[in-house]
Image (cartoon, rainbow, N blue to C red):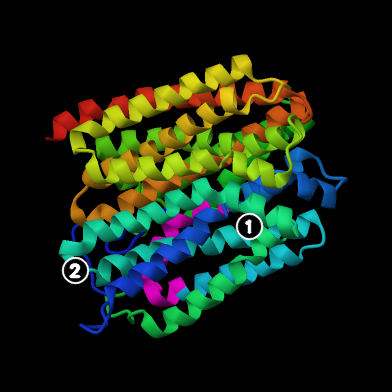
Amino acid sequence: MSSLSSPTSSSPTSSPPRDGAGGDTRPGVVLLLSAGATFIAFLDTTVVNVAFPDLAASFPTDRVPDLSWVVSSYAVLFAALLTPAGRIADALGRKKLFLSSLAGFTLASALCAAAQNLPLLITARALQGATAAGMIPAALGLLLATTPPRRLPAAIGAWGAAGSMATAAGPALGGVLVDAFGWRAVFLINVPVGVVLVLAGLRALPERTGAHRRLPDPLGTLAVTAGIALLVLGLTKGSDWGWGEASTTASVVGGAALIALALVRSARHGAPAVETALFHNATFAVSSTAAAFTGAALFAWLLSSPLFLTTVWHYSVLKAGFAVTPGALTSAVAAIAVGNRAKPHQLPAVVAVSMAAFAAASVWAYLALGTDHRFLALWLPVGLVGGAAFGGTLTALSTAAARSLPPQQFASGVGMTTTARQLGGALGVAATASVIAARGVGGPQAYRDLYLTCGALAAVAAVVGLAMARTLSKES
């Protein structure tokens, strides 16, 4: 979710526009369509994680770092294009972008299911990520434009919960589908859902009536997309190429330079690819930084857990999927609890306590994880703590980011924070692939190292999140 531009990404001083279809628009239907599209977009960030053993069997000549691009290609395009997609929604119309992106996502899902080799699958996943990025800002824009003000907080909460629950539930649902039908089913399931949502949206969604806005800077958009891709490529392939080799250095440094170029250009451009002006707000900047570290820890954890269960403990794909389900449940409970009950001044503590708890659980896993099956004594409590920690933290960070900005910048704020999370997630996946490539997929040491890395990232997120207490006090 990035610029999520609905009402605001391009005009920080204007009031939220109405896409309106007048009084006959049913906000409940718009919420259902928006939440449904958001659910499948975020589901596909994690649903393939548990399918890795099945993917490896289908593509036996490809190694884990190469297979990791089935996750990374989606995450890179999703993160990079969320921000400019907000402006595109304003320029072309939210209904038009929403439905065309949803149709593209459905087609890309079918292409993923039909892919006969890894390059085709990675290409189709990149297309999935790009079209998912178009769905999110348009969905939120439609929701904001058609929901009465008194019902807006509840609608936004339900919409956000759909994304959080999908991310956490992905491995469990993926386990069921892969066990029953094979890895292609995790993509094929999107096709009927997408078709139903498109047909319903054609009938129910309002037409755009707001003013046209400029399309986002194409050069900045290209620079940020290529920069993220190169950075992730260098981190993913570093173990294969050699960390001191010119190819690795060129990829990492070149990617960082392109991202920096995109940020500098965005700061000076009238229709920026990245809404850098939002970072002038201290609370927003801190919450987005914490979201990036949280996302890196979350995605590395969600990818490495099913791999550990299937390769070290030799769980079936179905059993591995259910083994990570308790974390998905506590994630949903924590997200709802924080969204409904946490006061603004409590949000820094939520982040700090949650991430500190997960850091402690990760260190415990690092010290105790081995080849012995210790589900009840070790795996279950770590999963319960991790799920609750991530559910509470992500909700708290999104809420803090949104509350720190004027109402007309709400969508942009939530979107940029989510982009930070997705970017961190892409880097977390790259780190996971690199560690596994260096240590080997079959033994516990690689996963112990990954849990320790997740713990370190969570500890940084806890410290950064706690800094929100100071920025919030200055703004109050």
Residue 228 falls in image quadrant: top right
Residue 87 falls in image quadrant: bottom left
Q: Where is residue 118 in the image (x, y as percent from the top left)?
A: 78, 54
Q: Residue furthest front?
A: 376
Q: Where is residue 5 in the image (x, y as percent from the top left)?
A: 34, 60
Residue 292 falls in image quadrant: top left
Could you say whether the residue bearing mark 1 is in a helix, strand or loop? helix
403 vs 298, nearest the viewer: 298
**Where, quadrant-wise, is the C terminus in this rendering?**
top left
Tell me: 207 left or right of 365.
Answer: left
Q: Pointer 1: residues within 10 angstroms few (<14), some, or many (20+)?
A: many
- Of label 2 and label 1, which has the lower sequence position? 1
**Which residues are drawn in magenta?**
76-98
Residue 148 is labelled as 2
Q: Pointer 2: residues within 10 angstroms few (<14), some, or many (20+)?
A: few
Label the magenta part by its dominant secondary structure.
helix
Disc 1 target residue: 126
Q: Is residue 452 above or below residue 124?
A: above
Q: Which residue is drawn at 63% across and 52% down?
A: 174
Task: Decide whether residue 239 is among the magenta residues.
Answer: no
Mark 2–mark 1 contact, CB under 8 Å? no
Q: Residue at x 41, y 47 (%)?
A: 418
Q: Distance between the residues labelled 2 and 1?
A: 36 Å
Q: What residue type is labelled 1?
A: Ala
- Residue 409 visible here: yes
Q: Residue at x 31, y 58 (%)?
A: 9
Q: Which residue lies furthest to the right in this view?
A: 61
Tell me: 420 left or right of 77.
Answer: left
Residue 249 is labelled as none
Task: Decide whether residue 92 is among the magenta residues.
Answer: yes
353 vs 175, nearest the viewer: 175
